[in-house]
Image (spheres, rainbow, N blue to C red):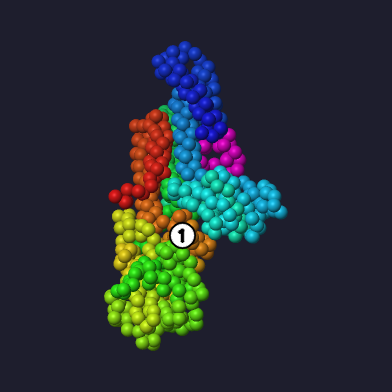
Amino acid sequence: MTKKQKKALKRIIIVLICFAILVPLDKTGVLSPFPWYAVAVLFLVPYLIIGYDVIIKSAKNIKNGQVFDENFLMMIATFAAFGMQEYSEALAVMLFYQVGELFESYAVGKSRKSISDMMSIAPEYANLEKDGDVEEVDPEDVKVGDIIVIRPGERIPLDGTVLSGESFLDTAALTGESVPRRAAVGDAVISGCLNGEGTLRVKVQKAYEDSTVARILDLVENASNKKARLENFITRFAKYYTPVVTIGAAVLALIPPLLFGGGWADWIGRACVFLIVSCPCALVISVPLGFFAGIGASSKIGVLVKGSNYLEALGKVRVIVFDKTGTLTKGEFEVSKVNASEGISGNQLLELAAYGEANSTHPIAQSVLRAYEKRLNESLDRSRLSEVQEIAGHGIRALLDGKVLLVGNEKLLSREGVDINCGHDNISPDSTKGDTATSVNDNQGGTRVLVSYDGAYQGSILISDTMKNGVSEAMSGMKRAGVRETVMLTGDRKESAEYISQASGVDRYFAELLPQDKVAKVEKLLSQDTVAFVGDGINDAPVLMRADVGIAMGSLGSDAAIEAADIVLMDDDIRKIPAVISIAKRTLRIVKENIVFALTVKILILVLGALGLAGMWAAVFADVGVAVIAILNSMRALNYTGADIYP
C-alpha cells in the first residue's frame, strides 16, 4: 500500500469511528436538545476530514472550466444535504465515496503492478570493461562492440553475445517462464534477464535504445494510451451524461415545487439522490480497470499487449494466420532420419555424408556436420578428402581415401551411373526430383541427401526444419478458445508446407508465396472475418500491420516484426496465443457485465429517487456499492491465465 493510500485509510478509520458514534446519537434523538448549528459543527468536522480533498479538487476544476465531474457531484449533493440538516446522510455519502476511491486506488495499483513489474527490468548500470579495469557506467553510454561484465545477481543491461563464462539466466520478468535458461560462450543474451551464479563477459551487439529492454519499456509505457472502443465510448458517454444529470437534478429540485407546490426540502432531497446516483464512477473506473487487468494478466504469462484496443480486437478474432518458418517451425535444419542401405550402419552413412559436406557452408550441409559431431563425438580427418567438386543443382563429388564419394540428389547419382533402386531405404522416384544443390525434396516435409561411395548406393539422410514444441497443442487450444479457422502462409514449397500443415493441425495452408502474396491472402481473409497474423521475420512486418491484430515473436523475432506487431510473445511459445485470446474474451465479457450492471442499477435508483421512493442510502449503494462490485468484477481478469483451455 502506498503512502497516499495509507494516509487515506487513516482518514477513513478516524471518520468511521466518528460516524459510528455520531449517527446513533443523532438517530436516537440524543442530539435533539442541542441547537442545529452545534450539531452541524459536530458532523462538519469529520466531514471536512474525509472530504476536504474532494472540495479542493472540485474548486480547482471549476476554476479550470471542468465543472461536471464526480467531485462536483459529491460536493453539491453533500452541501445540499447539510442545508437540509441531513447531517448523517451528508457524512455517509462522503465517507463511503472515499472508501470507494481507496478501493479503486488499491485495485488499479494491483492490476498495474503486474505491468510495472516489467519496468523493474530496466538496468541501473552496466559494468564496462576498459583497459583491464571494470567501471560502472550508464547503460546508454555503452557502445556496440564494448565488453561488459555481468556479475552474479545483476541484470543484463544490454543485448550481446557471451565471450566467456557460464551461468543460468532468470527470464521470468520478460517471458513469464520460471525455468532458468543456460548461457554459455557464443550464446546470445538479451537485456532485462537476471544473471544467476556465474560471471559473464558479454560483447555488446546493440545500443541501449535499440536493446530488448528499451523496446519493452517503451511499449509498456505507451500501452495505456491506446484505448479500446468500449473505453472511448464510456469516456464520451460520461462527458455528456454528467452535465445532463446535473441539469436534471436542478430541474427536479426547482420545477416541481414552483409548478405544483409542495415542500422544497423534499424535492431538493430527491435532487441530491439524483446527483449521487448519477456519478459515473462505476463505469469510468471499472471499464478501463477491466482492460488494464486483462493487459496485466497477459503480461504475467509473458505476452505484451501494446494497448487495450488490441486486447479488445483479439477477443473478437475468428481466424488466425501463421507464417511457417520461425513461427511454427524453428527455422533450423536438423537431421531427422538416417536411412542406411544393407551392409552399412547409420553412423557410417552419416560419416560419409559429413565428409561430402565438409567444405560446404549450405545450411543443409551444416546440419549434417552437426549431427555427425553430436553422434560420433569426433572431428573429420580432412586429409582423407581430395578433388572436392561442387556441382550446381546436383551436389558434391569428391574422393575419400581415393574412392568416389557422391553426396547430393538423384540427378547426381544418375549422372554417375549409381542405381538408387538397389538400396532398401524406401525412396520413391517421385520424391527425388528436387533441384537444390546437395539435396532433393522429400514428400514427408524434409529434404533427402543421397549418398554413394565407390559406385554403390549407401542410403539417404532426411533433413527437416523441425516443428516447434507445442504447436499442435496450441492449434487445438485455439479451437477451444473460439478461433474458427487457422491458416498457414509460407514461401516454402508445397510438399514441405503440406507436411507441416498436417503435423501441426493447421486447417488450411498456402505455399510458395512472396511477401506481397501474403498481404493479398490476408486482405482476402480480412474481407470475410476478424483476422490475427502471427509472424517473426522482417518480411512479415507488412502483414502484421495489415491484420486486425498482429502477433510477433519477441525472443527470436526481428525488430521490424516486433515494432509492427500489436502483441508480442516474449518467449516465442505460440501456446500462449490461445491463452491470451481466452484472457481477451474474458476481459470483454467482464467489461460488458460491468456496463450493463452499473447502468441498470443507476437507472433504477434514479427513477425511484425522482419518485421519492429511494433515499440517500440507496443513492450511496448505487454509487459506491456498484463501483466496488464492478471493481471486484474487473479484478477477476487479473488473476486469469487462460490455462483452463488446455485440459
* Residue 539 drawn above or below residue 262: below
Image quadrant in which you'd find residue 283:
top left
- The picture quadrant where one finds residue 456 is bottom left
Most foreground residue, 515 or 431: 431
Residue 484 in the image: state x and y as whole percent: 31, 61
Going 60% across and 53% down the picture, which residue do you hit?
Answer: 201
Say if 266 sits above or below 185 in the image: above
Task: From the viewer's perspective, tell me whether residue 66 is left or right of residue 338.
Answer: right
Q: Position of residue 202 (x, y in %)?
A: 60, 55
Residue 420 seen in the figure: yes
> Is residue 496 visible in the rendered structure shown here?
no
Q: Which residues are magenta?
A: 56-72
Farthest front residue in view: 401
Mark 1 neighbour density, 10 Å: few (under 14) some (14–19) many (20 or more): many
Look at the image and say whether residue 64 sits in the magenta stretch: yes
Residue sitting nearer the eye, 628 or 167: 167
The residue drawn where x is 38% and y is 50% is 583
